[in-house]
Amino acid sequence: MVASRSRVFQFLKTHGKSSLKQIVKGIHGLPGEVADILDIEVARGYIRKDETTIPVRYSVKIKLGRLVKKEEIVPLWRHKEIVQRAGVPEIKKIPQALLKALLEALFWWQGSRGTCVGFAGALYRWKNYLLNTGDIPTIEEIRAAGKIIEEDIKCTAGLFKYMVLPSKFPSPQFIYERSREFGGATFPAGSDTTWAAKIIANEGTVTWDKCLTSITALCAPRLWPMVEADYSKTLAVLAPIATEHRNKFAASNDFNEVFQAIKDGKSVFGPVNLPPDYFEPPNGEWQPYGGGSAGGHAVFAALVDESERLILTRGSWDGDGGLKWYSFGERFFDENAGPFLIGLTQEEAKIGESLYKSLTITANIPAWVRVDGVVIGTTPQRFAVEKGKIYVITVGADGYIAQTTMGDDSKTELSFMLDPVPVVKKTWLQLLIEWIAALFRRK
């Protein structure tokens, strides 16, 4: 049931089953903690939409993603090679104290859904926006903004604890759904940080002010199950908008390189395998562990602790874990994280384009693509090809004969025509033997 302390509960007790819009209008401007708004999640069984109850389950169980395979180094731009040529970038750094205040002003909970890749990717893209434009608010502006509850349930509703750049903050749900589509995800929940980074780099993101929950199921990360929207029609509207918000990236599996990139002011996110005590680790630090992992998780690498040489991130789960800061060091990173993805300046992106080309893989049917032994997604698939390097590319699908070829920077596209596995017809003698064997089995 809905907690009795909740303004949502009080409204429903007075007015009965109501639409989501009626609830938010009814509690707009009333005093109370922001956490009360989350009780909308619990109250879903009481919420009416078009005279129909929305049958959505509520669970406090946190959904974690698939585990990171540390040996998998997908074909991506290498951050080290680009930085060696670019030198130390001139970035308008966001002071750590200000960035910490900004992040604590954001209400970024993924709830009980496995959408951490969407949230980490949105924060990564958001910081890139701040760095590239210099449009960075002051702490005073953040504090003066005030709490927000949107009357018309725009994408800003419920996500922000304070009104902080809603017209520039990317939609986590859009990144999450597009990354799963890009990677051909078949698992029920979760995605891949590399898929998300590629979507942000090549397809772009949608900002909250340009997409309403009334027209799309891709935007509001906590409210989207309550919205009916055709995916293809929604994407046709949002895709052209998304191209206005893109950002190139490079990858690194080296802790010191990632640590320095964060220290230099760059935007960084990546995957980790969480320890069993990830929710309440000693002193908030994820330590190396033996045995099985609790599951995979995508994190926005927000800050660094220079004295302890730790990378700091913030929880994005239900409950108090959504407000806590966590940290991890070099050994944990080496054993349980990576590759981490680092946003590039425009100058660095130009260097990357001079070192790499893109190769697109297509097939006559939906198929998986493997490059140098690593499955990178499904067709059509585009990946970075280092100039002068040759790659072994294999494409296949269940029930079809896989094909392997070599690829390099001399081509921009490789197309595969996969043939079905031939069905071998049995001879009359084989059929007779099987018939006789079946007779004996019946006795």
Image: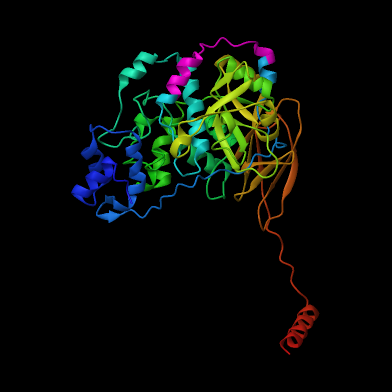
284 in relation to 428, above or below: above
Q: Is residue 266 visible?
A: yes
285 in relation to 261, above or below: below
**Residue 306 percent across, percent down from the top left:** 61, 16
Give the quarter of the image for residue 270.
top right
Residue 286 is one of the magenta-drawn residues: no
**Residue 81 percent across, percent down from the top left:** 70, 19
Camera-side residue: 383 or 172?
Answer: 172
Residue 94 is one of the magenta-drawn residues: yes
Q: In the displayed structure, does residue 266 sit left or right of residue 49?
A: right
Camera-side residue: 343 or 236?
Answer: 343
Instruction: State the residue at coordinates (33%, 41%).
Output: 215
Outermost left residue: 14
Q: Is residue 349 visible?
A: no
**Residue 94 percent across, percent down from the top left:** 49, 14
Outermost front residue: 282
Instruction: State the residue at coordinates (55%, 32%).
Output: 299
**Residue 167 percent across, percent down from the top left:** 36, 25
Give the quarter of the image for residue 31.
top left
84 in relation to 61, above or below: above
Tell me how the rendering is colored. Answer: rainbow
What is the tally of numbered marks visible in this picture? 0
Camera-side residue: 251 or 358?
Answer: 251
224 in relation to 386, above or below: below
Q: Quadrant of the C terminus?
A: bottom right
Q: Find the magenta span and give its range.
A: 84-103
Outermost bottom residue: 443
Q: In the displayed structure, does residue 289 sit left or right of residue 212?
A: right
